Amino acid sequence: MSRKINIAIDGYSSCGKGTLAKALAKALHYTFIDTGAMYRAVTYSLLENFIDINNTEAVIKHLPSLQISFNYQPDKNFYHTVLNGVDIESEIRGMEVSNLVSPVSKIDAVRTFLVDQQRQIGANKAVVMDGRDIGTVVFPDAELKLFMTAKPEIRAQRRLDELRYKGDTLTTFEEVLNNLNERDRIDSGRENSPLKPATDAILIDNSFMTRDEQFHQALELALNKIG
Ligand code: DC
């Protein structure tokens, strides 16, 4: 008899966590949740409403007005983030949000607000969730935990290729690399839920792995757990 499990995929910025999580969720018929997109959605809304992220009171007051959901059509490989009914997928991937999302993620009230929602989504299992604190904080009892990394230059090139593919011709390699390094520094150094591998996480460095190799390794690990 197979059982349903939760799969936590954590790791550094732009190392393919989302790609792997999506592929696993599709293969297992599980729900995929991109928690980074949730932090990005909050950041986007704070920017849109000119809320100073250092004004904790104003941030706390704003949070209950935010309804984050996802428009998933896995057959079309279509995964879009929706905020209060509006598709904000392209807005949250730009550099303006990328540059502010790590400082926003340090705010305790933001983390509590989003972690509550993430736990509710995973309460009935069958979820593949990617982020920074999934295996350590959101689902410390997840049956399978992966922690992913890759060399910063390789991650930056992959991210730049993605931006170019989406039509961004202006952002430079250095800007992307600096953003990744800066986010990793803030995400790893924060007091609340820092980015670090759970003690029982399996480490995967995918610098020189193809997507396919990585997917098959992870799928085998998942199937072993599912039984
Ligand atoms: O996965 P991403 O790069 O889209 O995430 C954007 C930022 O959100 C990341 O730099 C830190 C924050 N984040 C977080 O603090 N905790 C998570 N579980 C997911 C993301």
Image (cartoon, grey):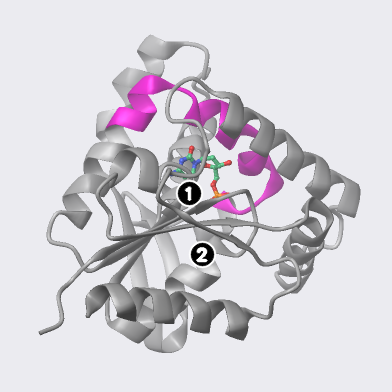
In the image, residue 127 lies at what x, y percent? 27, 65
105 within the magenta span? yes
**Quadrant of the rendered image containing residue 179:** top right
220 to the left or right of 188: left
Q: Are marks 1 and 2 in contact (CB under 8 Å)?
A: yes
Magenta residues span 92-112
**Mark 2 Cβ and ligand 1 under 8 Å apart:** yes
| Disc 2 residue crowd, few under 14, some 14–19, many 20+, Cα 10 Å | many
Residue under numbered circle 1 = 36
Would you say the magenta stretch is mainly helix, strand or loop?
A: helix
Q: Is residue 66 visible?
A: no
In the image, residue 75 lies at what x, y percent? 39, 89
Q: Amino acid at mark 1?
A: Gly
Q: Say what secondary structure mark 1 lies in.
A: helix
**Quadrant of the rendered image containing residue 21:** bottom left
Q: Say what secondary structure mark 2 lies in.
A: helix
Residue under numbered circle 2 = 18
**Mark 1 Cβ and ligand 1 under 8 Å apart:** yes
Q: Quadrant of the C terminus?
A: bottom left
Q: Amino acid at mark 2?
A: Gly
38 to the left or right of 188: left
Taking the spot 72% from the left edge, 44% from the top edge, the residue there is 180
> Is 125 above or below relative to 30?
above
Q: Is residue 214 visible?
A: yes
